[in-house]
Amino acid sequence: MITLRGVKKTFDGRVILRGVDLEIDEGGVTSLLGPSGSGKSTLLRCINGLERFDEGSIAVGDAVYRGGGHPDDPRAVAAIRRACGMVFQQFHLFAHLTAEENVALAPEVVAKLSRAAARDRARDLLEKVGLSSRAHALPRELSGGEQQRVAIARALAMEPRALLLDEPTSALDPERKGEVMDVLAALAEAGTTMVLVTHEPAFARALGGRVVVLRDGALAASDARSEPSPHRDPDADEHD
Amino acid sequence: MLGEIHRVVSALLRRLGLAALLPWVVALASALLFAGCSAPAAKGGGLARVKKAGVLRWGGDVQGGEPYVYADPKDPNRLVGFEVEIAAAVARELGVRAEFVQNDWSHLVPSLERRTFDVILNGFEVTPSRIGKVVYSRPYYVFAERLMARKGDPSIVDFASLRGRKTGTLAGSLAFELLRGHADVVMYEGTEEPYQDLVTGRTDAVLLDDIIAARYGVPKPELRVVGDVRDGYYAVGVHPDDADLAAAIDAALGRISKSGELEQILTRSSLWNERQARLVAWSDADQDQMLGKPPPPPPLGRGHVWLFVKGAGVTLVVSTLAMGLAIPMGMLLALARLHGPRPLARLAGAYVEIYRGTPVLLQLYVLYYGLLPYLHLRQHLEARGLGALAALEPLFVACVGLGMNYAAYEAETYRAGIQAVPKGQTEAALSLGLSLPQTLRRVVLPQAFRHSLPNVTNDFIALLKDSSLVSVITVVELTKQMTITAVDVRGWLGPGLLCAALYFAMSYPLGRVARRLEAKLEGQRPKAAAP
């Protein structure tokens, strides 16, 4: 469903991705595991068109875009973004909107649903992540775990074919990780296609599925089920 | 007051058992009191002061131009003009030298009161409202109030025909006092603009001194002289506490009139005519007649307050409309700068830099006197039967001019506000499939607006006060009304306080409303949307 072919990216003279080939099938979880600075977050952002790449191609369904200096076909970007919902490490909920409005925005603006229909969908999704009672709270009135659950509901609101998750629990306190984990586990159970970027092998293990290890911008190992040993690079910086 | 102090002090000293000191203490206190409160009241100290300094400092404004006081075309460092010669002659008669002090013409009287200079000598007309505020010397020039109109307009035939017509003149002039309550007066700060506006049809007539009319009005082929309305006098204005200086200047002017020197000076500037012959044999009776019996100044009354409220209304309307233009325009400029294609971004950047980098006064001036006359707005409006709208031209230019200036400041405010919205907000919106315009409108701008609100309020309050600048394009707003009334009632304190109170009454609630709005945006959103 998502096909990466020879994706290369350099930034400020530093090679971040050195030709990644990856095939992600519909249904099930794919975990991208790797130390900080291995390029796994960048790879995810390239899939969603938030970052550009220099060479290769990324295809999601029928939509394809290619690396290089030429501008992306806006229809391809729109199609891919619609097909892939994105969840960020720092949630990035719209600070001026309530939980419900956060979820309802894209259905209303992009999918052109009526305001009422968009709100209905938002309420359903908030119920799904267990936040019906917090629908009218602003992001800053929510805990980190609650915010991330709203963010997951928001990413699901456009009914994407795949969910891209960038370190979804790394910014949370240990006791808050569980509630997000439960939501993700339920989605995995339901057969949602998910691409999960994480540096925690335990997290990847918990969701099951396939694990892909990225080191220094290249695939180090790809394993269908078994646990790869995570090579935590002690020298790498911890900022991603 | 002295009696009061005497009583308190003597009671105090008696209680302290120091009654013997009483006379000394009282003498000391009185001396201090006199020194503190009434030192300048030593009437007649002016002449001694001038002689001691060896210089007669005379105030004027070179902006009045030729033939009064102006830079010598051959040597711009030197001032020439018939008043420079008269000042030199008077100073010579007093045994001192003359020194020119540049001062805004419409503020010559307050500056004299502050003693920025010793005397006013600069087309300083004898007007009823100034008699009593300053002591006038005998006149050194007899001018005529000359009425001019357009050649194609036969409806202006005399002073009476000005009733209700738009008539231009200088703010604070004798002509202004004559026209007020009779014609629809349009006030100017400079001498060229009234005639320029008469040519373009912004006004129907101009009433000004013959010297000004001859220099700036008569050369325009579109204009004609209707006639002279009455005589008026230029005289030297002296501080009322300097009666002896006034007497000495009077005597000096008398000597140079009788000796024929005044005639020579006026002839050199082509100003001598039969009217000036009266100056030679000027008598005390002539002086009394010139000064007349000034009417007592009217107290600051209900009528003035009403005018002030009207002025405040103009200030509020101009500021609100200008801000109404500045906000959307600033928003567009900020967006063009941040997200527009490069040429547009550059253009928006240039706009902001130019409008911030030049004085708003100059922008208003260029727009109103420089640019607009070439657009023939009046003719277009009249062709469409909308001639009545032409009367709103100054107000329109005031709103547009201030709005365009403030748009530059708003653009910067919004730019900062937009940049303060975290990048993650944009990425989240884009990743959901929103286009960039949708992202800006639904996610970035609502948050940027919140960041910018305190600065926008600040700008609006600043604009309320900056709007006083539009008086240069003949709009009478609150500050202008204050200066007019100050001349009427012969005092600045009352009108000044009233003016300040009205500005405060407008800006304070604005600040309160903005703080409320901020609190509302920041705080809990009261949700009625719940099912």
Image (cartoon, coloured by chain):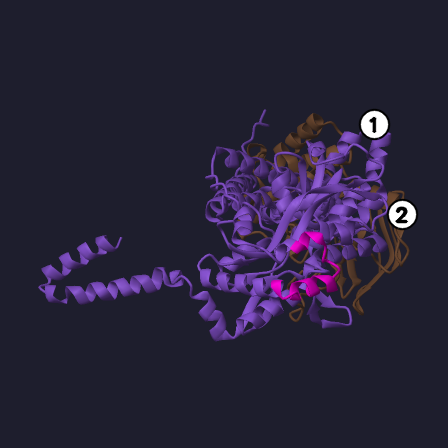
Chain colours: A brown, B purple
Between B240 and A123, the one lying in front of the other is B240
Quarter of the view holding residue B357:
bottom right
Between B300 and A85, the one lying in front of the other is B300
Callout in the foreground (1, 2): 1
Chain designation of label 1: B
Chain designation of label 2: A
Q: Residue at x 85, y 35 (%)?
A: B380
- Which range of residues does the magenta coloring cover? B258-277
- Mark 1 highlights which residue? B385
* Residue type, mark 2 in image: Asp
User: Horizontal placement of B140 versus A14: left or right?
Assistant: left
Label 1 sits on a secondary structure element that is: loop
* Residue type, mark 1 in image: Gly
Magenta span contains residue B271: yes
Q: Residue at x 62, y 38 (%)?
A: B180
Near mark 2 (Cα within 10 A), the count class, few <14, some 14-19 or many ≥20, is: few
Magenta span contains residue A89: no
Q: Position of residue B33 (x, y in %)?
A: 30, 61
Q: Residue at x 82, y 45 (%)?
A: B373
User: Horizontal placement of B283 versus A74: left or right?
Assistant: left
- Mark 2 highlights which residue? A73
Q: Position of residue B522 (x, y in %)?
A: 55, 42
Quarter of the view holding residue A13:
bottom right
Between B350 and A48, the one lying in front of the other is B350
Between B19 and B421, the one lying in front of the other is B19
Label 2 sits on a secondary structure element that is: loop
User: Horizontal placement of B242 versus B482: left or right?
Assistant: left
Q: Position of residue B193 (x, y in %)?
A: 74, 49
Q: Residue at x 48, y 39 (%)?
A: B298
Q: Quadrant of the C terminus of chain B?
A: top right
Q: Give me the C-alpha separation between circle 1 and circle 2.
A: 53 Å
Near mark 1 (Cα within 10 A), the count class, few <14, some 14-19 or many ≥20, is: few
